[in-house]
Image (spheres, rainbow, N blue to C red):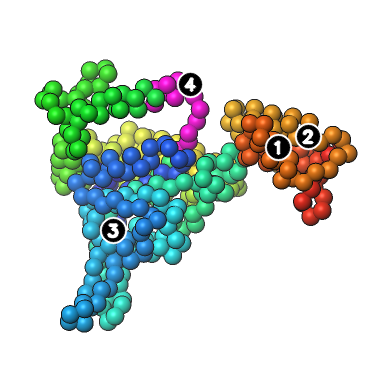
Amino acid sequence: LAVDGSVKHLPDGMRLRGDINVLLMGDPSTAKSQMLKFVEKAAPISVYTSGKGSSAAGLTASVIKDASSNDFHLEGGAMVLADGGVVCIDEFDKMGLQDRVAIHEAMEQQTISIAKAGITAVLNARASVLAAANPAFGRYDDTRSATENIEFQSTILSRFDLVFIVRDIRSATRDRTIASHVIHLHQRGSQFGADGAATAASGPAKTASGESVLDIPTLKRYIAYARARVAPRLNPRAAQLLRNHYVQIRQEARGGPAGVPITVRQLEAIVRLSESLAKMQLLREVTETHVLEALRLFRVATLDGAAKPRGGGPGGAFDPVAAARPEFKAEIERAEKIVRARMPVGASAPEGRIVREAVACGVSEQAVRTAVFVLVRRKELEYRQQRKRLHRLC
C-alpha cells in the first residue's frame, strides 16, 4: 500500500495511477483503526481522518472567502494534502453518500476539479486510500450475503484494489495469542515514551524467533527510497500469465452474485499489486512470482471475501444455518428448542414476546430471529395478523 505500483504516462498525456486503494471491512475490535494508525506513522506522507467528522469539502477542497479582502481562495482537503502519500479514512461507512461520491474522481483519476465562486482549478490528489468500515449490520452477518453486508455502491467498491473482510472468529488458540499480546503490551507500556521509542538503549528490536525488526524511521526511509528510485514493469511471461488469469476470474464471476464487480479496474489492481511487490524488493522487472502472489492476495481478499455467495440449501435456497459459523449454528439450534418449548403445537404468540423470552434464556437476538426464519421456512411456524404473531403448526 505505501510502496504502490508504477505510474505510467501515455503518449496522449493520460496518466495511469500506481497508487493502491485498500478497504478493511469487518467486525468491531479487530484492530482496523490500529492498522490505519500504523500506516499513518510508517508512510512518508500521510493524513489520518475519521469518516464521521469528514465532509466532501474536507476530503477534497473548498473555496474560502477572506473576511478582510472579500477575495476567494482555495484550501486543499485531506486528499490534496496527502499528495504522494496515503490517506487513512477511519469509519468509512459513517460518511454520507454525497461525501463518498465526492472522492470518486480523486480515487481513480487522482485529481480534484473545482469550479466555484469564479475559481476553476484542477488539484492533484495522487494518494493511496486506506479505509476501514463496519458491515451494514454492525457485525458481519453469516446469514446474509456479502452484498447485503457490504452496503457500499459498486461505483466506490470498484475503485478499491483490495477489499479485506476482517472477521472476529472465536478460536481458543487465536484468542490465547491475542490475549497474551495485549497483556504483554500493558505490562511493557511504562518502558516506552510517548513516541513509542524505548527509553533505555537496548539495541534493535527482535522477534520471538530472534529476527531483527525494522524500526519505523528506517521503514519510512526505505519506503521513500523505493517509491522514488524503482519503477518496475511486467516482463512478457508475467504479462501473459496475468492475462490468462484475468480471463479465468471473469469467467468464474459470471452467473453468480458478487459483492465487488470484476472489471478492468480489477485487472489494473492486480498489475499495481505485482509492481508494488517487485518494488519492495527493489527490482526493475515484475516476474511470474510477483504476479502469482498478487493474484493470491486478490483472491483471498476481494474474491473470497466480498464476492462470496451465500450458503445454499436444497434447490438452491438460502440456508442460514449452513452459511453460519459452527458456534453460531449451535446457538441457532438452541434457539429453535427454546422457541418450540415456548410455543406448543397450535399455540399463537407475539413474535416480540418470543424473542424477548428466548434472549432472557441467554441466546442472542440474531440467533433467535434466524431460528424463527428457519422454522417458518420449514412450515413449523407461520406468521399471522400481518406478521405480528407467530402460530405453531407442528
**Local crowd at mark 1 within 10 Å, few (<14), some, or many (≥20)?**
some
- 15 vs 204, nearest the viewer: 204
CB contact under 8 Å: marks 2 and 3: no
- Give how far apart the Cα atoms at labels 4 and 3 are: 41 Å
**Secondary structure at numbered mark 2:** helix
CB contact under 8 Å: marks 1 and 3: no
Residue type pointed to by label 1 = Glu
Q: Quadrant of residue 291 in the image? A: top left
- Give how far apart the Cα atoms at labels 2 and 3 are: 56 Å
Residue 128 visible (yes or no)? no
Q: Is residue 205 left or right of residue 368?
A: left
Pointer 1 or 3: first along the chain:
3
- Residue 66 is inside the magenta segment: no
Q: Badge 1 is on which residue?
A: 357
| Tag in front: 1 or 3 | 1
- Give how far apart the Cα atoms at labels 4 and 2 are: 33 Å
Pointer 4 or 3: first along the chain:
3
**Secondary structure at numbered mark 1:** helix
Q: x, y (%) of residue 53?
A: 36, 57
- 190 vs 318, nearest the viewer: 190
Q: Which mark is residue 151?
A: none
Q: Residue at x 78, y 31 (%)?
A: 341
**Local crowd at mark 3 within 10 Å, few (<14), some, or many (≥20)?**
many
Residue type pointed to by label 2 = Arg
Chain part drawn in magenta: 165-178
Residue type pointed to by label 3 = Met
Q: Which mark is residue 79?
A: 3
**Local crowd at mark 2 within 10 Å, few (<14), some, or many (≥20)?**
some
Q: Badge 2 is on which residue?
A: 342
Q: Is residue 107 left or right of residue 317?
A: left
